[in-house]
Amino acid sequence: MMKNKKIALLASILVVTLVAGVYAAVRLSNILPTSWTLRESGENLVLYWADGAPSGDLYRGEWITTKIGLRNDGLATYTVSDKFKIYTVASGLPSGCITIEYNQDDGTGWHDMTSVLTGYGSNTLTGYFGPPAGFTVGSPYDVQTWFRIMFNGNAPIDVGYYFEAWVEQVP
Amino acid sequence: MEKQKLAVCLLLLSLVTFGIFAYVSASGSFGFEVYETHTRAWHIDLDTVYVGIPKSFNVTVECKKEKGEFLITYHLEISGPESLCNDYLRLGWRDTDGADFIIGKEGEQFSGTGTLTWNSSPVEFKAEHKNNITLTLIFLTLDALGDYNAKMWVAFTEKPIEAQVRITPKILNIKSHGRWITAHILLPEPHKEKNIDINSVKLWYNGDFVQAEWGIATKHFLMVKFSRGEVIKMLESEEGKVNLIVTGLVNGIEFYGTDTITIIAP
């Protein structure tokens, strides 16, 4: 009988200790779960004509000068390559029919970039601007660059020419 | 027969205890609640978040307790693509308690890869108080694209009670052969010294502690005794003034108090 009382006392102490221990421990609130899917909007990087889009009649042997800007409207950082194409309805664009240069207003003048053009013989020439491995567009970013283009003596005439530029993410 | 009765009683007691905790958990009677501020929902679906574009949402942390003061830590966990790391994002935190900071790139650090975790330092929080938090999420790289799950919660304890503590002897000769070091503990109202769990009382120095061996509550204070030998062992190599801390639990709430004694080794 005495032994049972001792066991009961011990058990009571254990339970009280357990309850007091739990009570004194760190307690938690509910857990608030949140979910989402992260996507690229495709609207953060903006290429724009900074000095008006060239249009109208163009002539062989004359420079056509324009200014293009690249702006990051978002807060992410991208590694990108500026791509462009010049195309026409003519049957083919012969090698050397176009000269293209850029000027970054850094005092170093105009730099030839004609060598980036590919696709001679077809009606579409493609090229890129900047390092082949791409360059970093952080945030904020808004950089404008002068470009000039000249149609040489072998460029087809009396046809329409079109220009498109875009930005691609470099993996 | 007696043993069987005892076993049944213990089983019933265990069931009741478990039942109380199960009820508290299952019924949603949390001491603190975390919910979407406007809808009070316990789930937030942000749908689509775009890289580089800030996405804000509001969370309220509310103390449901009617009295008391608490120490809480905020916890965040974000799971995403395997490569997810601290530099992929910036999480702005602005709340009505005056906090305004960034977690992630250029701010406080998330830990981990794939699953990021962060927890705050303890902050004080009063009963029935609400803190409205605006969280603004910005992902900074296309490498972060993917599906995400996040969790937010708070962990809390009762704010420790500051007690008055007097430790004797005030000058401790480490070569003396006394038996006890004594601490007199006085708690602020409305706490009662008689409710102190003597087994929880400890004497601390530099991260080491000695547990109280016994104690007696009087009308005005609790006197607890620590083994002099153990205390001297804890303080060995010390000489001069040392600051000792006494901690313990009263009705499950932690209390603490400090006192300075002088160690001499003639």
Image (cartoon, coloured by chain):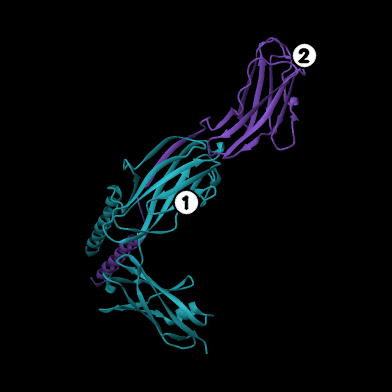
Q: Nearer the viewer, mark 1 or mark 2?
A: 2
The image quadrant where one finds the N terminus of chain B is bottom left
Residue placed most toward the observer, B17 or B160: B160
Mark 1 and 2 residues: CB-CB less than 8 Å, in contact?
no
Identity, as a three-letter code, of the amino acid under mark 1: Phe
Badge 1: few (under 14), some or many (20 or more) residues near its Cα, within 10 Å? few
Above or below residue A15? Residue A141 is above
The residue that mark 2 highlights is A154
Q: How far across and down, in percent of the image, does residue B266 sit?
A: 52, 90
Q: How far across and down, in percent of the image, does residue B200 sit?
A: 36, 70
Find the residue positioned furthest to the bottom: B266
From the viewer's perspective, tell me whether residue B73 is left or right of residue A60: left
Identity, as a three-letter code, of the amino acid under mark 2: Asn
Q: Secondary structure at mark 1?
A: strand
Chain under callout 1: B
From the viewer's perspective, tell me whether residue B9 is left or right of residue B205: left
Chain B tint in image: cyan
Q: Inspect this view and state whether residue A78 appears.
A: no
Q: Secondary structure at mark 2?
A: loop
Share a chain, discs 1 and 2? no
Badge 2: few (under 14), some or many (20 or more) residues near its Cα, within 10 Å? few
Q: Inspect this view and state whether residue B48 appears.
A: yes
From the viewer's perspective, tell me whether residue B162 is left or right of residue A44: left
The image quarter in which residue B203 lies: bottom left
Q: How far across and down, in percent of the image, does residue B164 sit?
A: 35, 76
Chain under callout 2: A
The residue that mark 1 highlights is B101
Residue placed most toward the observer, B121 or A166: A166
Q: How far across and down, in percent of the image, does residue B167 sit?
A: 39, 81
Chain the render paints purple: A
